Amino acid sequence: MNGNLAHPLTLPLTKNLAMAQLCYFAVLTILLIMVSPGAADGNLGSHCVYSHAGPCNSSATNLIAEKCNPSGSGNYTHNSTYESNLLNVFSNLTFAARSSRAFYNASAGSGEDQVFGLFYCRGDVDSIHCLSCVEASASHLKGCNAREGFASYELCTLRYAKRAMVDTIERSLGNNTCDGPGGPTTPDISLFNQTVVTTMQRLTGRVTSGNSSSYFATESAKLYKDLKVYALVQCRPDLTGKRCEDCLTEALSLIVDACLYRGQVWGMYFQPSCQMRYDVVPFFNLTTTFTSPSPPAAVGSSSNSSGSLGESHD
């Protein structure tokens, strides 16, 4: 990597691609073909692509990040009141997902044994895969044996704690992942980086503008010939617009430093409050948004879509 490579947030767009950029996009095109849904073995690894049958590789149960006892609040005792309340919360959350909710928060108990929990599914996920993801999350977190924990899967995030979590950003629980060693790199990838940055900024503005019916948006941006960048942003529905904006702005900064600045062709950031992701292959559902009882889902075009998330209930 060239030590003089400019930071992606300050890179200007240029009309003429340098030879290095052309080589970069040629490699990206080859990568796109290799990881397309028609790949021979069908194993797409981290580049999970939607097919007509639903998310590939059982991505509803593809664990992205997890933390048990993140605040150092200790463990609970088996067969204790706290464990009973936690199991009740998990039961309420899975019942809500079974009732086609894409977001839900619940609590059980009182005092020192009170447990709070919530989940949200990605805005393009149908109710079947949302339920599968929430069930997997609850099952996984039962093994924590801690008074607090969270699990982020490809299609949902579930968080529980001994305190209310409404309208909170938990930066310490953030996790970013990028393309591993050996990914395509070049001394000059300014067009790719700037396209990702401006697309993410545009999506962040769209979901926090006050005119959006949800905190979820996707977009595909053309890069070079048939090569595109696919981007997704989402905030938990209980956040205020300002907190959603703050969460996504920080997510973009982390993605720039950890992924784009190092020449990575895909990257994502997850925390219990928001998520952001980009890739050179379509990893989200381009045609289906989550169906929720109220309000009805808003379906966008194949290149831009916004989904409506379910209601919040105490």
Image (cartoon, rainbow, N blue to C red):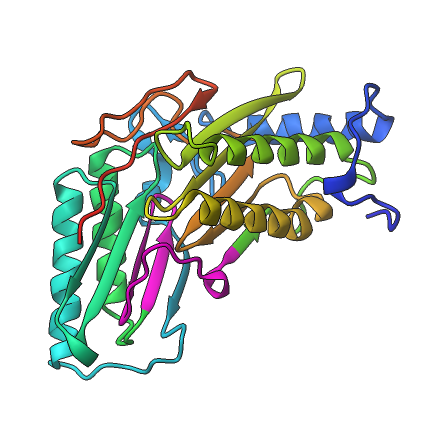
Residue at x-position 38% and y-position 19%: 300
Residue at x-position 30% and y-position 31%: 308
Residue at x-position 32% and y-position 56%: 166
Along the viewing direction, whichever of 110 and 174 lies nearer the viewer: 110
Q: Is residue 167 magenta?
A: yes
Residue 12 is left or right of residue 249, and the answer is right
Whole-percent x, y for residue 122 in the image: 35, 39
Quarter assignment of residue 108 = bottom left
All told, the count of numbered labels is 0
**Whether residue 180 is visible:** no
**Whether residue 160 is visible:** yes
Residue 179 is left or right of residue 59, and the answer is right
Along the viewing direction, whichever of 110 and 96 lies nearer the viewer: 110
Whole-percent x, y for residue 291 in the image: 22, 29
Quarter assignment of residue 169 = bottom left
Locate the C terminus and report the quarter of the image it occupies.
bottom left
Along the viewing direction, whichever of 250 and 74 lies nearer the viewer: 250
Residue 144 is left or right of residue 29, and the answer is left
Whole-percent x, y for residue 57 in the image: 36, 40
Residue at the right extreme of this rendering: 4
Residue at x-position 83% and y-position 31%: 20
Tell me: residue 247, above or below residue 265: below
Q: Which residues are magenta?
A: 149-175
Residue 61 is left or right of residue 170, and the answer is left
